[in-house]
Amino acid sequence: MQLKLFEEYFENKVLEDLFKAYFDARKNKRNTINALAFEKSFEEYIFVLWEEILSGNYKPKASICFIVNNPVKREIFAADFRDRVVHHLICNYIAPVLEKLFINDSYSCRKGKGTHYGIKRIDHFIRSCSKNYQENCYILKLDIKGYFMSINREILYKKVKTNLFSKYHKLEFDVDLILNLIKKTIFNDPTQNCTIKGNRKDWQDLPKDKSLFSVKENSGLPIGNLTSQLFGNVYLNDFDHFVKRDLKIKYYGRYVDDFVLIHNDREYLKSIISEIKSYLKRELNLTLHPNKVYLQHFFKGVKFLGAIIKPYRIYIANRTIGNFYNAIQKQNEIVDSHKPTTEEIEDFVASMNSYLGILQHYKTYKIRKDMLWKYLSGWWWNNVYLSGGYKKFNKMLRSVS
């Protein structure tokens, strides 16, 4: 009797958590075709999804595959909205558990972290290691070649499972149920069941190590999935601890596959490149990018996460400014083709504010002012307004589709 009540509690908890995952998933995807179709009968769809999960019959649906060119050319697999709900469910359960295992200076896709935090930390590391720029210190910056496409799914699943079971007695969810969802998500091959959006020619200039269509068997995660971002941190977590514990690197930070090591001894940094290369290949089947090895004195600075960090100052990188310009032009194209809908105006505000949020951390007031007044279509100014001195766009209440 007690066991039955226990099972019913977890089953009802999964249903409750599925609804939460749905509302999380729709926050930024509400105007997509999949999201709108799901929203029309979302309660019914969630109950069906709940039954599939409990019975073990859940299977991921077809993804939409396409190429994006900014900030760099990448292949994206957009999961069906129903599967995005499952991704949020998985992350809502396991992210708080895994978070406790990560080092502080892994910055990607973590609450309270992100690019600005990572930039500030690397700047702080350089100041600390150089005794406020009074002593020599050196910066080693490395990159992993084709990271997401090289992730071995067997190794990844084993790491996720091991980490969860190490905290098994503290978990407040059905571990076997969630592990089943994790397994189906990790080992799902989206290339076997996808819709190609765009033209096959879009893939012509994409390197093979950037595409799931060209990866080794049982390798690769689709860029774009929420779970891929979390699993990417899990995959390199042991490596992070190896760098800090075994290589004795006190000043170290990583954002996805881009990592920085700072030390007083240039020769020591140079000597551990081979150790890092060997560890990544032996333990994770990963390869250091041979053309992205940067080792310089701190005075020359370092480019990291869209910023250039130099003594006493941090600049925004030209590529970030260029991406802001491209985003403005993309919004202007919408105005040129039709009158934007309410949803498109909301997307405009979100897109512009994401760039303004990055830029306002640096001395870019003139850049923000010039970019917006010189290049932004006048139509937008009749429907949105700025607040805080070129820091944030707001939608006018009278704006209608």
Image (tube, grey):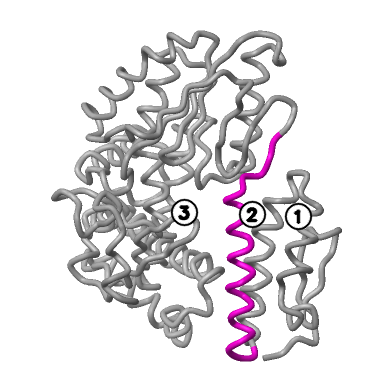
Q: Secondary structure at mark 1?
A: helix
Query: Majority secondary structure of the magenta segment?
Result: helix
Could you tell me how many numbered marks the image carries?
3
x, y (%) of residue 335? 64, 84
- Residue in the foreground of this view, choosing between 236 and 379: 379
Residue marked by disc 1: 367
* Residue 372 in the figure: left or right of residue 199: right
Can residue 182 be seen here? The reply is no
Per the rendered image, the range of residues in magenta is: 314-339
- Residue in the foreground of this view, choosing between 323 and 106: 323
Residue marked by disc 2: 321
Q: Secondary structure at mark 2?
A: helix
Residue drawn at (77%, 76%) of the image: 384
Going by the numbered disc 2, the residue's amino acid type is: Ile
Q: Residues within 10 Å of mark 3 (few under 14, many from 20)?
A: some
Mark drawn on residue 92: 3
Q: Secondary structure at mark 3?
A: helix
Residue drawn at (62%, 30%) of the image: 121
Q: Are marks 2 and 1 in contact (CB under 8 Å)?
A: yes
Tell me which label, 2 or 3, sits earlier in the chain: 3
Q: CA distance from mark 2 to mark 1?
A: 8 Å
* Residue 258 in the figure: left or right of residue 313: left
- Residue in the foreground of this view, choosing between 69 and 211: 69
Tell me which label, 1 or 3, sits earlier in the chain: 3
Examine the structure image and report whether residue 324 is included in the region drawn in magenta: yes
Q: CA distance from mark 2 to mark 3?
A: 34 Å
x, y (%) of residue 37? 43, 85
